[in-house]
Image (spheres, helix red, strand yellow):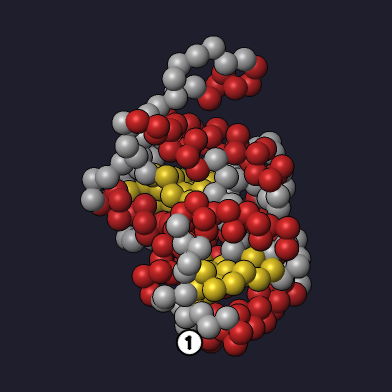
C-alpha cells in the first residue's frame, strides 16, 4: 500500500486534460505517494464560467464520495475556480485542497505580490471572487487572460502555451509582481519551464495542492467535522442526488 494516496479530480470531462493534470501531480509527488487522477463521466468538457462550475461541482462531489469509499487520504480539486470546494470538504473525511487556493497561498510564501495568468477574460471575475474569499486581494498585482478557451491547451498546436508565456512576460514587465500564478489546471506542465526561463516563481496550483495535501496528511490533519464542515445532514434527496449522501 502507498504511504499516501491522493485523489486528483479534474472537474471537467476531458480525459486528455485529466492525463496532463495527473502527470503534473505525479511529477512532484513524494516517493510513496500514489496519485489517482479522475474526472466525472458526465458534465462539461471545460469550465469557463459560473454555469459550468455549477454543473462541475456535482461531478466533484461524486468523485470525492468515490475516493472516500476507496480509502484515499486526501483530494485535490484541479480547476482554478475550485468548484464545489466547501461542499467537498463537508463530504470528505480527509483534506480537500483547491488548486486556486493552494497556488495563491504558495505565491504569498515566495513573493509579496503575484499576478495571475488564466484563459478566457470571462473567468477573471471568478478569480477576483476567489482572491476576496481567500483574503489574497491585496497580494495580487493584476490578472491577465490569454483569450483562448481551456481546451486550446490540449490541441497540440502550442499556441496557447506561447500565449501563456507572453502574458507572463508582460505581467513581469508591467505589474511589479514577484511571482506568477497559472490560472488553469491545463497549464500545469508549464510552471517549471517558465520558472527556469523567467527567473521568478511560476506556480502551478496542481503541484501546490498535491504538496499541501501531502503535508496535511503527514501532520495528521483532516477536514474538521465540527461546525459547517461536518458531514451533510441526512435527508431524503431525490433522483441521482440520493447517491451523494455519505
Q: Is residue 244 left or right of residue 108?
A: right
The number of numbered badges drawn on the structure is 1
* Residue at image location 55% in from the left, 40% down from the top: 84
Tell me if residue 139 comes above or below residue 77 in the rendering. below
Query: Residue 113: x percent and y percent?
Result: 47, 75
Q: Residue furthest top?
A: 236
Q: Residue furthest left?
A: 219
Q: Is residue 192 visible?
A: no
* Residue at image location 41% in from the left, 48% down from the top: 6
Q: Residues within 10 Å of mark 1 (few under 14, many from 20)?
A: few
Query: Residue 169: x percent and y percent?
Result: 61, 84
Q: Is residue 138 visible?
A: yes
Q: Is residue 106 left or right of residue 189?
A: left
* Residue at image location 67% in from the left, 82% down from the top: 166
**Which corner quadrant holds the C terminus?**
top left
* Residue at image location 44% in from the left, 24% down from the top: 232
Query: Residue 32: x percent and y percent?
Result: 32, 55
Q: Residue furthest front?
A: 138
Q: Nearer the viewer, residue 86 or 4?
A: 86
**Which corner quadrant holds the N terminus?**
top left
Q: Nearer the viewer, residue 72 or 94?
A: 94
Tell me if residue 114 comes above or below residue 52 in the rendering. below
Query: Residue 110: x percent and y percent?
Result: 38, 75
Tell me if residue 242 comes above or below residue 57 in the rendering. above
**Quarter of the image where one finds residue 40:** top right
**Quarter of the image where one finds residue 173:** bottom right
Q: Secondary structure at mark 1?
A: loop
**Which residue has dot 1 on it?**
199
Amino acid at each position: 500500500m502507498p504511504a499516501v494516496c491522493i485523489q486528483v479530480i479534474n472537474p471537467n470531462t476531458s480525459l486528455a486534460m485529466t492525463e496532463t493534470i495527473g502527470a503534473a501531480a505525479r511529477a512532484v509527488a513524494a516517493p510513496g505517494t500514489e496519485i489517482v487522477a479522475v474526472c466525472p463521466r458526465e458534465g462539461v468538457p471545460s469550465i469557463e464560467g459560473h454555469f459550468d462550475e455549477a454543473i462541475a461541482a456535482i461531478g466533484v462531489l461524486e468523485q470525492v464520495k468515490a475516493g472516500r469509499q476507496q480509502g484515499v487520504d486526501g483530494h485535490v480539486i484541479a480547476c482554478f475556480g475550485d468548484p464545489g470546494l466547501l461542499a467537498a470538504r463537508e463530504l470528505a473525511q480527509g483534506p480537500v485542497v483547491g488548486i486556486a487556493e493552494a497556488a495563491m497561498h504558495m505565491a504569498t510564501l515566495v513573493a509579496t505580490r503575484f499576478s495571475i495568468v488564466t484563459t478566457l477574460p470571462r473567468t477573471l471575475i471568478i478569480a477576483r471572487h476567489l482572491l476576496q474569499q481567500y483574503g489574497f486581494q491585496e497580494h495580487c498585482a493584476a490578472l491577465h487572460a490569454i483569450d483562448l478557451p481551456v481546451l486550446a491547451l490540449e490541441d497540440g498546436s502550442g499556441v496557447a502555451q506561447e500565449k501563456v508565456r507572453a502574458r507572463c512576460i508582460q505581467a513581469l514587465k508591467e505589474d511589479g509582481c514577484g511571482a506568477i500564478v497559472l490560472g488553469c489546471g491545463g497549464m500545469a506542465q508549464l510552471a517549471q519551464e517558465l520558472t527556469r526561463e523567467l527567473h521568478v516563481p511560476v506556480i502551478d496550483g496542481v503541484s501546490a495542492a498535491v504538496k499541501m495535501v501531502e503535508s496535511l496528511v503527514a501532520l495528521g490533519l483532516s477536514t474538521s467535522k465540527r461546525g459547517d464542515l461536518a458531514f451533510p445532514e441526512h435527508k431524503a434527496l431525490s433522483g441521482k442526488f440520493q447517491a451523494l449522501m455519505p
